[in-house]
C-alpha cells in the first residue's frame, strides 16, 4: 500500500504500543491522530502501579531497531545476563540466560514511553490529543466517537483506519464485543502484584548485582527485582490475594516487616521504605485476555487490547512491539487496509496465544522450580 497525507489513521492509546505504531504509520506517510485518555505523561507525575520498569527482549528490540531507535533506547537500558536466585538462607546463585552472553534489558516504562512520544512529535504528520478517549467505534463507516475528558463533550471522527492500542480494557474492543461472533475470554489468576523499592547505596551504587534479574522464589509466590538507571531496583511481589500468607494477612506495618524479614532476609534491609510503600502502592490484578477476530473492516486491535498476558515471561510489551513489525510488513505487501489487517491478525493470533500460555507456565518456573537443586544443576549443565 502506498500512502499520501490524505490517508488518515486514528490510534486510540498513547502507551508503548500506540506510540510505536504511530511512528511506523507516520513514516509510511499516513496522517496519524493519536487520542490518549490521560494527560501528557511528560507533564504530570503519575504512578498507577503499572510496572515502573520492563524487560525488553529480542522481539521488542527488532521492532525498535527497524525504525532506527534501538541504539537510543539501549543507552537508557541496563543489560541483565541471567537470573540471580535468592534463597531463604541468604545464599544466591546466578543462572545465565545463555552461554554466549546473550541478555535481556531493563528499561523504564516512563522513559521509553516519553522517548517514543518525543520521536513522534518530530513527525510532521502526527497530532496528539491528550485527555480524549474513545467511547465507541462504528466499524461499517470506520467512525469513532470521542470524548473530550475535561468538558465531557463528544464528537465523531471518520478515518481510513482505526487502531485500538488502548490497553487491556480497550474501549475499541468493547465495541467489537457487541458485534456478531466475536470471541472473548478473560481469566484472573489467584495472585496480585505490588511494586516496592530497593534504594541505592549511600555512595550511589547498586545494592545488588545490577546486571541480573533478581528472583526470590518461595514456592507459591515470589518477589522479583529489576535494576533502574538511578541505581535503585523496582521489586514486584507476586502474592496470593487470599490464604496465609497473602495480601489479606499482611494488614499492619509490623506484620509486613516481620514477614519480609523472615521471607526475604537479604532484601529486607535494602528496602528502607517498605512499610510505607507496601500500604501506599496499589495491589493490582493479573488478567489474561484473549479475543478474536482482532479486526472489523478497517478497525483493528493491537498490543494489550488484542492480547493481555501475565507478566511472568516479560513479553507483553515485546509482543505488542512485534505486532507493529508484523503489521508494518503486512501493510507494505497489501493493496488495502482490510487485506493488511487480515494478514496481520492471522499471523499474530497463534503466536500471542502461545506467549500467554508460556507466561503462565513461567510463573511456576520462576516462583518454584528455579530454587530446586535439580533445576539449577540442569541449567549449569546446559551452559557448559
Ligand atoms: P498500555 O500500556 O496499557 O497503554 C494503553 C494506553 O491507552 C494507556 O496510555 C491508556 O491511558 C490509553 N487508553 C485506555 N483507554 C483508552 C481510551 N478509551 N481512549 C484512549 N486511550 C485510552 N511487558 C514486557 O514486555 N516486559 C516486561 O518485563 C513486562 N513487565 C510487566 C510487569 C507488570 C507488573 C505488568 C502489569 C505488565 C508488564 N508487561 C511487560 C506488559 C506491558 O506492560 C504491556 O504489555 C504493555 O504496557 C502494553 O502496551 P499497550 O500500549 O498495548 O497498552
Image: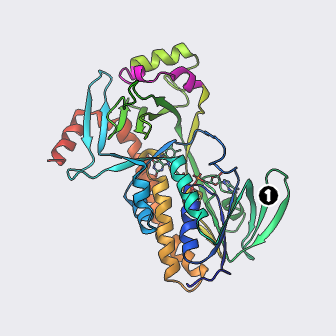
Q: Which of 200 and 150 is in front in this view?
A: 200
Residue at image coords 56%, 47%? 187
- Going 40% across and 64% down the picture, which residue do you hit? 62
Residue 319 visible in rendering: yes
Instruction: Return the residue at label 1.
Output: 147
Q: Judging from the image, what secondary structure is the residue with disc 1 in?
A: strand
In the depicted view, which residue is nearer to us: 309 or 185?
309
**Residue 372, position as x, y percentages in the image:** 27, 33
Relative image position of residue 292 (x, y in whole percent): 58, 65
Q: Nearer the viewer, residue 123 or 174?
A: 123
Q: Give the range drawn in magenta.
A: 263-279
Q: Which residue lies furthest to the left in this view?
A: 384
Residue 316 on image: x %, y %:
49, 53
Residue 349 in view: no
Magenta stretch containing residue 270, yes or no? Answer: yes
Check residue 131 for magenta coloring.
no
Q: Splitting the image into 4 quarters, where does residue 354 fall?
A: bottom left
**Quick check: 276 above or below 190?**
above
Mark 1 Cα-neighbour bin, 10 Å: few <14, some 14–19, many ≥20? many
Vertical placement of residue 309 versus 156, above or below = above
Tell me which residue sits at (32%, 41%) in the image: 211
Amino acid at each position: 500500500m502506498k500512502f499520501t497525507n490524505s490517508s488518515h489513521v486514528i490510534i486510540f492509546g498513547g502507551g508503548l504500543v500506540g506510540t510505536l505504531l504511530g511512528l511506523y504509520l507516520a513514516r509510511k506517510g499516513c496522517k496519524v491522530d493519536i487520542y490518549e485518555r490521560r494527560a501528557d505523561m511528560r507533564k504530570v507525575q503519575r504512578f498507577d502501579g503499572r510496572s515502573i520498569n520492563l524487560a525488553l527482549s529480542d522481539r521488542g528490540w527488532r521492532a525498535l531497531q527497524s525504525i532506527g531507535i534501538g541504539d537510543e533506547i539501549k543507552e537508557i537500558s541496563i543489560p541483565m545476563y541471567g537470573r540471580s536466585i535468592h534463597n531463604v538462607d541468604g545464599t544466591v546463585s546466578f543462572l545465565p540466560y545463555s552461554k554466549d552472553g546473550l541478555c535481556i534489558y531493563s528499561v523504564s516504562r516512563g522513559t521509553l514511553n516519553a522517548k517514543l512520544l518525543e520521536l513522534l512529535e518530530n513527525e510532521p504528520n502526527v497530532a496528539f490529543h491528550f485527555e480524549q478517549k474513545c467511547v465507541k467505534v462504528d466499524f461499517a463507516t470506520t467512525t469513532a466517537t470521542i470524548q473530550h475528558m475535561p468538558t465531557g463533550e463528544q464528537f465523531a471522527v471518520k478515518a481510513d483506519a482505526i487502531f485500538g492500542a488502548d490497553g487491556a480494557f480497550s474501549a475499541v474492543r468493547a465495541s467489537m464485543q457487541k458485534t456478531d461472533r466475536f470471541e472473548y475470554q478473560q481469566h484472573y489468576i489467584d495472585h496480585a502484584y505490588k511494586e516496592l523499592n530497593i534504594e541505592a547505596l549511600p555512595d550511589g551504587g547498586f545494592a545488588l548485582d545490577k546486571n541480573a534479574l533478581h528472583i526470590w522464589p518461595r514456592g507459591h509466590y515470589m518477589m522479583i527485582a529489576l535494576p533502574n538507571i538511578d541505581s535503585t531496583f523496582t521489586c514486584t511481589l507476586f502474592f496470593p490475594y487470599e490464604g496465609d500468607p497473602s495480601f489479606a494477612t499482611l494488614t499492619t506495618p509490623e506484620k509486613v516487616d516481620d514477614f519480609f524479614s523472615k521471607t526475604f532476609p537479604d532484601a529486607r534491609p535494602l528496602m528502607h521504605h517498605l512499610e510505607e510503600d507496601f500500604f501506599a502502592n496499589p495491589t493490582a490484578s493479573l488478567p489474561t485476555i484473549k479475543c478474536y477476530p482482532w479486526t472489523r473492516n478497517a478497525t483493528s486491535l493491537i498490543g494489550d487490547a488484542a492480547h493481555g498476558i501475565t507478566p511472568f515471561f516479560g513479553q507483553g510489551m515485546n509482543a505488542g512491539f512485534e505486532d507493529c513489525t508484523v503489521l508494518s510488513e503486512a501493510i507494505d505487501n497489501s493493496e488495502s487496509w482490510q487485506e493488511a489487517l487480515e494478514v496481520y491478525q492471522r499471523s499474530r493470533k497463534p503466536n500471542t496465544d502461545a506467549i500467554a500460555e508460556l507466561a503462565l507456565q513461567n510463573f511456576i518456573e520462576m516462583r518454584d522450580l528455579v530454587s530446586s537443586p535439580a533445576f539449577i544443576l540442569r541449567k549449569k549443565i546446559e551452559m557448559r
